[in-house]
Amino acid sequence: MTSSPAQRVAEQVLAARASGTTLAIRGHASKRALLGERRADAVLDMRACSGVLSYRPDELVITVRAGTPLKELEAVLAERRQHIAPGIPLLEGQGTVGGAVAAGLSGPSRPWRGSLRDVVLGVEMVNGLGERLRFGGEVFKNVAGFDVARLVTGSEGAFGALLSVSLRVAPVPECTRCLVVEMPATPALTWMRRRAAEPHPFGGLCWLEGRLHCRLDGAAQAVADFTGEPGMVEEDPAFWTQLRDAALPFHAGWSGLWRCAVPPATPTDEQTVCIDWAGALRWRRGSINTVGESCPVGSSPLALGACDGLLSRLKAAFDPDHLFNPELMRADAPA
């Protein structure tokens, strides 16, 4: 009998554990420029573990294998005018569902639609012992016990290899409107912070290169009722896709860029290249000295220093031999 793709992944993990071989989990490797290349003795290729397992549009839930291309997921949902509300970046124009969940990245609508972690309902994974484990389920209120399904979102594969993921989907907004106006960074940040708290159907607020960009997604009447800044003009929605997918000119090469998650009120300065998430996400030429998380592009925050005690214990429980992406969550890494 031919084994399933999931079973073959488990068998490869068991063989690696027996031989002491470390594994770099890989799908399309589309995030290596942003989060760094994962290095190990061998590659655990997840691309064969692909396909939709179940889709219930009326219940707003889909379950797919982790190696499923994001473009395939988007196409399936688009047929029923549904999508993943936070927006999943397609770096280098590609990516897999498992890689997206492992990276935990969300698009420009995150402040209003929630993060990718918020729509992960359940996962199946293989841990460092070669065991197939299932956490969560296919309903939003399935939160009994420790919420491992959301724990692994953003863990970059440090706890194990994802086999399948259940996601909550949402209807595509009835109407979209994109506006832009010339404005310096500091007043643009003030404007975004003030307007973001108002009851408008925002899908994104961003400042880039002297221009304030505003996106609205929602009911046609609510979008039409929005009163923007004087001088705002209509903008091509393609800007927001390029921003989500890190495909704008300032992303090219990534050299010297830092990605900083900060309090929205954090002042801007001449090193700020782009302000996203209505102030909470900054792209800068250099780190930022404030409360928040800053990481140079090309590195992972999980690889920059020794992980704390809780993460160390979790890593030891799921992957005691540090088989997966071994440079992440190292207890002995330099601080």
Image: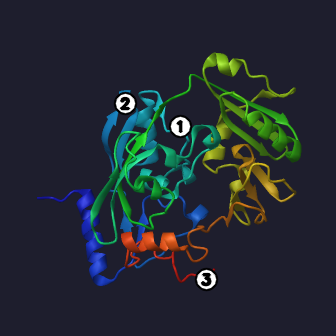
Q: Which residue is mark 2?
A: 59
> What amino acid is found at the position of numbered circle 2 in the picture?
Glu
Q: Tag 1, which secondary structure?
A: loop
> What amino acid is found at the position of numbered circle 3 in the picture?
Pro
Q: Position of residue 54 (x, y in %)?
A: 30, 39
Q: Position of residue 330 (x, y in %)?
A: 51, 78
Q: Tag 2, which secondary structure?
A: helix
Q: Mark 3 packing: few (<14 Cα in 10 Å), some, or many (20+)?
A: few
Q: Which mark is residue 300?
A: none
- Seen in the picture, residue 10 relative to 70 is either above or below; the reply is below
Q: Residue at x 74, y 42 (%)?
A: 206
Task: Name the image quarter holding residue 167.
Answer: top left
- Sequence-earlier tag: 1 or 3: 1
Q: Which residue is mark 1?
A: 85
Task: Name the image quarter holding residue 40.
Answer: bottom left
Q: Are marks 1 and 3 in contact (CB under 8 Å)?
A: no
> Gap in Å between the C-alphas at discs 2 and 3?
47 Å
Q: Position of residue 173 (x, y in %)?
A: 56, 26
